Amino acid sequence: MKKTILSFLSSLKLTIALLIIIAALSILGTVIPQQYGAGESFTRMSPGLVKTFRSLQLLDLYHSVWFIILMCLLSLNLIACSLKRFPTSWKLFTATPSLDRAKPFEDLSSDNIVMIEGERSGITSRVERLLMKRYKRFRRKDTDTATTFYGEKGAYSHFGVYIVHASILIIIAGAIIGSLWGFEGFVNLAEGEFTDTVYVGRQKSLKKLDYTVRCDKFSIAYYDNGMPKEYRSDLSFLENNAVIFQGPLLVNHPVTVKRIKFYQASYGSIPGGRVHITITRGNDKGTTLTLNLKDSFCLKENGAKVTIQRIEENFMTMGPAVLLSIHSSKANTQLWVFKDIEKMKRAIPNLLQKVPKFNPGLFKPYYFELNSIAQTYYTGLQVSYDPGVSTVAIGAFIIVIGFFLAFFSSHKRLWVRVDEQEGKTRIMVSVQSNKDPVGLEREREYLLRHFKKGS
Amino acid sequence: MIINTTILSWVTFIYFGSAIFYIFRMVTGKEFWGPLASLSALAGLIAQTAGLLLRWFESYKMGIGHAPLSNLYESLIFFAWAIVFLYLIVEWRIKSRNIGAFVIPFAFLSMAFASFSPDINTRIQPLIPALQSNWLISHVITCFFGYAAFAIACGLGFMYLLKGLEKGENSGPFLRFFPRREILDELTYHSVVIGFIFLTLGIITGSVWAYSAWGSYWSWDPKETWSLITWLIYAAMLHSRFLRGWKGKRMAIMSIIGFVSVLFTYFGVNYLPGLHSYF
């Protein structure tokens, strides 16, 4: 029983099956909208379907029991396979073949044999010099009639596959560390607002930080063509009312405070904003008021009441504007006050005749001017702590090294025997490799060429 | 039209010519077309490199300087560039023009899609905040070298399957020009290994970037997920080859399935909701 479980866990069939099932489940996860951050897609699905998906945990597939079981199986499979195969690789790595073996030289084709004129001892030492330069693990054995050399290199290439598999386990371990002890929170802060708690969506809970974060200012910069150039939050971090850190937060440039990272994730504008309006009556010097949406004020003349009905950043692409509604005993009027009204009048000469509502002097004898709209933004911050990142990074680094060992290095073994035959010196070359036959062939040709030369 | 896009749309025709020459060479069995095919591919690559560098330079002149790797148009151009670049290295290494007819058309199609699709904006655009990162260049280059190597493997897979139709001596010069099946198999394997390593590097660089931009090295965004799916497919392929000795037809089919997954990672994902909406 124990044995069958072990052989099941260490089977290649399981590996392939797991890789394919994980791939298939992942595909499913990209087709079914996932719970986290895809809220409105659910409204398009039938409630029954949503219920079925939810009970099968398909709405948070990558954190479902299915996925976790598969990842556990994959880890076990990796470990079992490696344990099963490692002893063989270790043996290949440490093996020191006897130099008396005849087998490497049996059935050697003639193009692996060089016959040259010259004294055997001189040629032998020449062969040795060349081989010693190229092979680190190198041995020599002399008998009365022959000298045999054995050299090998790249024996560590047997470990490439284990390094790759270990690094995958390290990455999985890092992911587990992150999911157990880390958190991923979110918070919206209006300019001037502060908080010490963030919302952790995955756990549907609030997380309290050791300090307070305050959004001092949020700003957007645009390119000439209107595309966004920079989202920037100026943040202050406070502990016991003392600022412990202050600085700008930009996309791609997170801020770390006490191991917790803050990211510029989103933003929005708070409806309305604050407007500065100047009211002039005839030739007086005018009064400037600062008002919010739905604020009202009274005009001296006939006690008319003016309300800020709407505030638009860019009304009908003609720039900032506010809609005023004016109530008096005589009449009810609405009029749009544009910041750029002078520019508009120049562009469209009879604008005020065509659209009387755009006339800032419509309600006589008053004249309204919009000086500016101060937009208030809120910034959306992602607040993360992931203690598993360095582990994952180490895994990622090692996997690359493992790939190079596994794919681009090979264990080359070489036997060379120098003896005498028919009055000439004979050099026999036999090479072996666990992979990379092309590289092996190149090595063989190189050696034979050099053995032939200088004879 | 700005000069770099003019050059790049001409490169499309050069690659078209090159692909035709490679095909002529195989269909007619005349080596005459071979040097023409190689030279036009090389000329196209040089012109394309110049076009890309010019585009890079122009973006700096516009005051929004960035590497030409920032939108669908630029990525398609780079995809074609990487295919031809890798292909010419392979042609030079194996000293054979026999696989060009099944590789250069991929480069041509990518260029044609970039240059002539009405939905693709060819203008140089400034970088939005999420793309303003030093990781942009290394992420895009590693990913697209991976995609290009997989494209070559897919072309080789097709050749392997077609070569299977050959019936002794009486088949035409077309199939006879194909390399032997063992060589095709070996080349497919090498291309997949190169692609697999670049894809891994692409996923790693992407994760590092995501960690600084989105606050998490892995968010199961559809593009991330599909790159993992592609990675798993090729991992399954390599394992079955190493341990089961699966070769030949199965590998050829796997290299085609793998490339379909690559294409979905590249294009299909745009139809799914996610963060990776730039490409």
Image (cartoon, coloured by chain):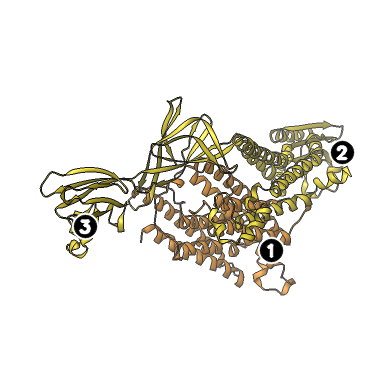
**Closest to the observer: A400 or B24?**
A400
Residue type at numbered disc 3: Met
Q: Is residue B212 left or right of residue A321?
A: right
Q: Secondary structure at mark 2?
A: loop
Picture residue at 46% right of the left edge, 35% below the top: A195
Q: Secondary structure at mark 3?
A: helix
Neighbour tally class for label 2: few under 14, some 14-19, many 20 plus, Cα within 10 Å: few
Q: Is residue B270 left or right of residue A136?
A: left
- The picture's colour for chain A is yellow
Q: Secondary structure at mark 1?
A: helix
User: Label 3 is found on which chain of the structure?
Assistant: A
Residue A357: horizontal and vertical position, in percent? Answer: 23, 60
User: Label 2 is found on which chain of the structure?
Assistant: A
Q: Nearer the viewer, mark 3 or mark 2?
A: 3
Can residue A224 be spotted in the picture?
yes
From the image, tell me which residue sits under label 1.
Answer: B160
Disc marking residue A101:
2
